[in-house]
Image: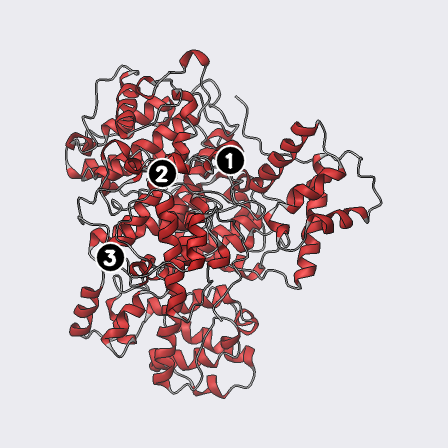
Amino acid sequence: MSSFQGVLVSDQWLQSQFTQVELRSLKSKFIFVKNQNGKVTIGDLPPLMAKLKAFSEMFNEEEIRNILGESGSDINDEVDFEGFLRTYLNLQNRTASKSGSSRSPSSFLKATTTTLLHTISESEKASYVAHINSYLRDDPFLKEFLPIDPASNALFDLAKDGVLLCKLINVAVPGTIDERAINVKRVLNPWERNENHTLCLNSAKAIGCTVVNIGNQDLIEGRPHLVLGLISQIIKIQLLADLNLRKTPQLVELVEDNNDVEELLGLAPEKVLLKWMNFHLKKGGYKKTVSNFSSDLKDGEAYAYLLNVLAPEHCSPATLDSKDPTERANMVLDHAEKMDCKRYLSPKDIVEGSANLNLAFVAQIFHQRNGLSTDNKKISFAEMMTDDEQISREERCFRLWINSLGISSYVNNLFEDVRNGWVLLEVLDKVHPGSVNWKHATKPPIKMPFRKVENCNQVVRIGKQLKLSLVNVGGNDFVQGNKKLTLAFLWQLMRFNMLQLLKNLRSRFQGKEISDVDILNWANKKVKSTGRTSRMESFKDKSLSSGLFFLELLSAVEPRVVNWNLVSKGESDDEKKLNATYIISVARKLGCSIFLLPEDIMEVNQKMILTLTASIMYWSLQQPVNDSESSPSPATSEASPAPSTNGSSSPPAGPATPDASPAPSTNGLSSPAVALSPDSSPAPSVNGEDDSSLVGVSNLTINDAASDSTVSSSLVESEGNVSQKATSSQVEYEDTESQEVSSKPVEHEETEAEEEVSSSQVEKQDPRSQSDT
């Protein structure tokens, strides 16, 4: 079995300008044109390039043809793939020049993966290395490789086997990965290494990281800008984890009026941190308002005031008296060290206004000493304002699913962030490309409320076109923040999304629709095919709480994925939790993008059990099978999948690592399997046979085409053709928990423009530039 190979380019410099996800997408486009015409010529490039999202807003086909003509080449000259890539880079540079701006560095991976600029900050690298050395120095496996030298590239070399990144995720959100599922040894074969990276990327999505445009091969190669971008996100999630009312109810002190608590709940963690900082600066007499973590902190004065308020016992008048910013920054760091804050940044970083490092430094100060009172009345009020556990778990589920889609917006608080309708329109555009009329959409910030209603009215209209159950629901219901309605709508949207994916597999079933009964039968027959007697009677079968059935199912789809020496009988609650945790990590290592928690398996949460089963089924059915193993119907589809499709195939003959699994999809995230089932069952309950779409999809997108992810071009192409075939019963949601989806009759009449949208096929313009005037 060969090791995983990505798209290789003979020119190493050219290879370094693209991620593997980008290369695979561009390669598929190149091959598509070549298959149509027999070869690719310079004359074929303008219409192809003009359709790419990276250039469509800047150049039309004629302008691209003129640019290509500057080289003096004949339009009939044949172009190879490397020539195609060089043309792409040339146009990309022209696009940057024409726009007059370049992307600024960001801690978010979406920004750091740009092919226009692959630079990394040495100071940030040194800070992250110090963080890793501090938190992982006692790890049994990594301690022999630590401390890492920040001046070298040892960080990127150590990240190549995936162990470091998996361990760091567990530091950020403890318990995310069952470390028994990590392949840990000094020398890993390519298959085991690929598994670790798949586990890492799927787990990173499950804690809220944006991993668009990154694949296993990028991590295996140790690409600095991608590795550092991912580490930055993981550390940021760790540092900002407590900046919410559920974890730190004392934050309610930041608002004067109880009515403002709801606004505080909707703020992103970074905004809460700024609000906390300004709260103390105001008490200390600082006259300015800090609005960012870069320019406003360069002179060090804000830090000096903040530390004087929080730790007056270490206060020194010389800090504010100093006229040299570097000297003042050094005294600030000395003051912070006396508070036991680790020195992860230098005076130079403060003076230069490093946003990422300043944010990390302020977060450390908050963790060490937040200076907030413990007023029991205020705290109890804050606790009442937070959602109950069930709603919070559902909110997390949909939030992570939306963020995994790769849309331009990042959702921090689901209920607040969807109220203007823009995020929902972006999600709809991902789930059903071309459905949104961007001419009639208003981009945030939106000052006038009726613009928000217009956005949400279009959301409702599209939902009805997709046959979602939205009886007596109006756009204003979303604007007013109806939580049950929001959860119910997103649940249906996820189901619709997965329904489209499953329909793309119907060639295996001779056109037969897949229902949840088929999923149940498939799982039982898959387990039975291995000679085992376990079965589940339904997705509510209490015997599933032990976890043994799912371990047997995982072992059935890939025999080497489960290490049975680590499996308990699942009799006590502790044993059940161990098994459930192991199931989730093994499924992610296999390639399933899932968000459910161990508690969902232990409690036999019907919807989460269904999504888990569907994700395993989806992964299994994507694997190549022999013709003799194909089955004519879902009920008899028992073919044991061949090893992974990511090129890593099965491990070499000989002893295999017990818990190793076949390398998942093409890039470690590809399994569009279940991006649905985070922490709790999403709002509505499952609806009989029609919950075949219970898995949401994490569409990996790149700049040139939102639909060109690593799944396959054919899978995406068919998504646009199936929506009208979905019947009302297949996507209708029976709300057994909240009874009604609707809250009140529609209050908003459709405008003429809205009627035009619903009566004709809307064309998608991705300007997303119309903002509120």
- Residue 65 located left or right of residue 219: right
Indicate the secondary structure of the residue bearing disc 2. Answer: loop
Residue found at x 45% / y 75%:
291
Disc on the earlier residue, 3 or 2: 2
Residue drawn at (35%, 30%), measured in percent from left and top?
616
- Residue that badge 3 annotates: 745
Q: Kindly tell me whether residue 538 is visible in this rendering.
A: yes
Dot 3: what SS? loop
Q: Amino acid at mark 2?
A: Val
Q: How is the image coloured?
A: secondary structure
Name the kind of residue labelled 1 in the image.
Answer: Glu
Taking 154 as reference, is 273 left or right?
Answer: left
**Camera-nearest residue between 65 and 651:** 65
**Foreground: disc 2 or disc 1:** 1
What residue is shown with label 2? Answer: 674
Among the two numbered marks 1 and 3 on one chain, the one whose residue lies closer to the N terminus: 1
Q: Position of residue 425 (x, y in %)?
A: 42, 53
In this rendering, which labeled residue sits more in front, label 1 or label 3? 3
Q: Are marks 3 and 2 in contact (CB under 8 Å)?
A: no
